[in-house]
Image: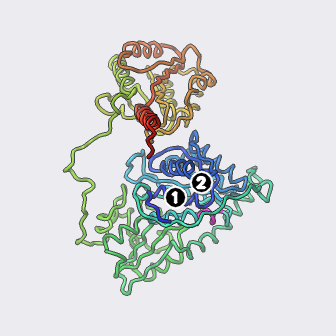
């Protein structure tokens, strides 16, 4: 069957056709569409797949591991910074191994289109000693997903499936194959497999190391790793994942005067790399992300001057790989970009809060507080409300990573900063903010926490928030004094009352929480549209 799909959706379809029983994730661009697609497909096709959003990436990874324990196949999806949150479970899953196939799909974001950093998830896979698949196009993303589940069960290891933004958010027509049926429940043959007591873990880690040679041989013979030889090669090129497409674009197909190693399955196939070096004096490494392959092959060659790439300036050390970058590295002067991605011909359009958003009223009130107490007092988090850093509000001073707002406010208060105000969204709060609030409560830290509750994970498309209807009870359970858990609604007509409320809680010598409840305007619009369509029996 032919389907027109985003790269992220091809992974979802590949997982469905692999007979998965569950997909677990936390929304984060550019990975969100993987789970969204499966949720919609589940409803349309009435398939039995467990598919709900998790509280964070760590719980997603752990839940998928539990399904794997029961012998069924599961998919975990997240963006690259989410892998930091899931790292404990992710790395230890290589030592426990798996029972049912387990694939971890991670979408990296070179150039930071919607992220705090450019980190490369391949380093995590290498660190954990697990195989890594990196598709070069949408069809390969579908095929690799299916291969990854079989590979996972063959070697009893999780598989990391790594894509980048450009592949995740571009479309292509793909061919799908007949779907597999879901696994039956079956338990590990070795009862203690998932019990990482030191005596067991040491033995299983040694077994993990022993299987590495087999994984390397698999990479050498993989259909996804191919060495194309030119008759009179002037330069060897290693093109990783999506980079092969940029090479094909600037050379109008496979180059006739360069050897090309298409590299999409790891560990790095050392024998293919050795053959490439035997045939060429210099090697250019093209990879989207960090110089992962470049650093690894420097240990293979005798002199680093033979390797060209990000480490010595032949490729820029940051940002996405692009065709013009590839052309420059290959000294192909005839190639020119059709669109200049950094063009100054277009006016800058910074993002802004939606008209009618409750965060606007929150920041209007907070701006008056800042004008009275001074700047450098507001610690924010990841979400739509991060836009409070921009004009006309210029209301926040920090935004580091999910859940950092409350601990940073506490640390500043410990240092003597007054007032110390933390702003965190409802979804981010349950993702990784609760533990920071518990720290603050345990020491009765004099901070004011504002939870901007818009009843959704709004920045990633309005997915359900795990905290919906539970925020006050969660805060009580964490030990916040009930008299200092205030729920109110931010509206233009309530700015004066909100300012007075915040000032009152700032002066409280302890930890207080203000929950500002107002549903995201975008989710309200979608609900109203859906209800209107249902009322008039409009079906799309």
Asked whether disc 1 touches disc 2, contact meaning CB atoms under 8 Å apart, the reply is yes
Reading the image, the residue beneath label 2 is 75
Q: CA distance from mark 1 to mark 2?
A: 10 Å
Judge left or right: residue 143 versus residue 288. right
Within 10 Å of disc 1 (Cα), the crowding (few <14, some 14-19, many 20+) is: many
> Can residue 383 be seen in this snapshot?
no
Residue at image point 39% right, 49% down = 112
Within 10 Å of disc 2 (Cα), the crowding (few <14, some 14-19, many 20+) is: many
Q: Earlier in the sequence, mark 1 or mark 2?
A: 1
| Front position in the image: 390 or 384 | 384
Task: Please say if 41 is above or below 537.
Answer: below
Percent from the top left, x then y, of residue 373?
36, 18
Residue at image point 35% right, 28% down = 356
Percent from the top left, x then y, of residue 435?
59, 32
Magenta residue span? 148-152
Residue at image point 38% right, 31% down = 397
Label for residue 11?
Answer: 1
The secondary element bearing badge 1 is classed as helix
**Figure quadrant of residue 529:** top left
The secondary element bearing badge 2 is classed as strand
Task: Specify whether residue 149 is painted magenta.
Answer: yes
Residue at image point 69% right, 49% down = 66
| Front position in the image: 516 or 499 | 516
Percent from the top left, x then y, of residue 507?
46, 13
Residue farthest to the bottom, as pictured: 231
**Figure quadrant of residue 200:** bottom right
> Can residue 357 be seen in this snapshot?
yes
Task: Specify whether residue 265 is painted magenta.
Answer: no
């Amino acid at each position: 069957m032919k389907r027109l799909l985003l790269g992220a959706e091809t992974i979802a379809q590949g997982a469905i056709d692999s007979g998965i029983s569950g997909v677990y994730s936390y929304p984060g661009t550019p990975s969100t569409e993987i789970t969204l697609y499966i949720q919609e497909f589940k409803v349309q096709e009435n398939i039995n797949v467990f598919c709900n959003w998790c509280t964070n990436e760590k719980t997603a990874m752990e839940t998928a591991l539990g399904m794997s324990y029961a012998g069924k196949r599961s998919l975990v999806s997240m963006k690259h910074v989410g892998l930091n949150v899931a790292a404990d479970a992710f790395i230890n899953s290589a030592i426990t191994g798996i029972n049912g196939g387990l694939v971890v799909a991670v979408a990296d974001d070179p150039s930071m289109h919607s992220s705090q950093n450019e980190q490369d998830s391949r380093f995590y896979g290498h660190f954990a000693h697990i195989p890594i698949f990196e598709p070069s196009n949408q069809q390969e993303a579908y095929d690799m997903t299916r291969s990854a589940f079989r590979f996972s069960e063959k070697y009893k290891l999780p598989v990391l499936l790594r894509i980048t933004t450009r592949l995740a958010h571009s479309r292509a027509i793909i061919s799908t194959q007949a779907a597999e049926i879901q696994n039956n429940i079956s338990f590990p043959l070795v009862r203690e497999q998932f019990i990482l007591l030191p005596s067991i873990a040491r033995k299983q880690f040694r077994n993990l190391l022993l299987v590495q040679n087999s994984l390397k041989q698999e990479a050498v013979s993989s259909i996804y790793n191919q060495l194309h030889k030119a008759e009179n090669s002037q330069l060897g090129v290693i093109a990783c994942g999506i980079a092969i497409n940029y090479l094909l674009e600037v050379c109008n197909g496979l180059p006739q005067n360069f050897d090309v190693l298409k590299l999409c399955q790891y560990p790095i196939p050392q024998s293919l790399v050795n053959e490439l070096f035997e045939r060429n004096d210099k090697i250019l490494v093209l990879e989207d992300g960090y110089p992962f392959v470049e650093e690894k092959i420097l240990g293979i060659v005798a002199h680093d001057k033979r390797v060209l790439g990000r480490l010595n300036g032949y490729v820029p050390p940051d940002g996405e790989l692009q065709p013009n970058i590839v052309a420059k590295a290959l000294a192909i002067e005839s190639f020119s970009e059709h669109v200049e991605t950094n063009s100054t011909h277009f006016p800058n359009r910074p993002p802004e809060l939606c008209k009618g958003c409750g965060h606007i009223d929150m920041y209007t009130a907070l701006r008056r507080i800042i004008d009275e107490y001074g700047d450098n007092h507001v610690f924010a988090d990841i979400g739509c409300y991060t836009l409070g850093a921009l004009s006309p509000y210029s209301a926040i001073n920090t935004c580091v990573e999910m859940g950092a707002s409350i601990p940073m406010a506490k640390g500043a208060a410990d240092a003597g900063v007054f007032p110390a105000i933390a702003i965190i969204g409802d979804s981010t709060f349950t993702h990784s903010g609760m533990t920071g609030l518990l720290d603050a409560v345990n020491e009765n830290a004099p901070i004011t926490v504002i939870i901007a509750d818009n009843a959704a994970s709004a920045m990633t498309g309005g997915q359900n928030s795990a905290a919906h209807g539970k925020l006050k009870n969660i805060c009580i359970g964490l030990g916040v004094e009930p008299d200092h858990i205030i729920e109110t609604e931010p509206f233009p007509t309530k700015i004066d009352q909100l300012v007075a409320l915040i000032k009152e809680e700032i002066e409280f010598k302890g930890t207080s929480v203000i929950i500002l409840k107002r549903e995201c305007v975008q989710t309200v619009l979608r609900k109203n549209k859906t209800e209107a369509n249902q009322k008039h029996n409009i079906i799309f």
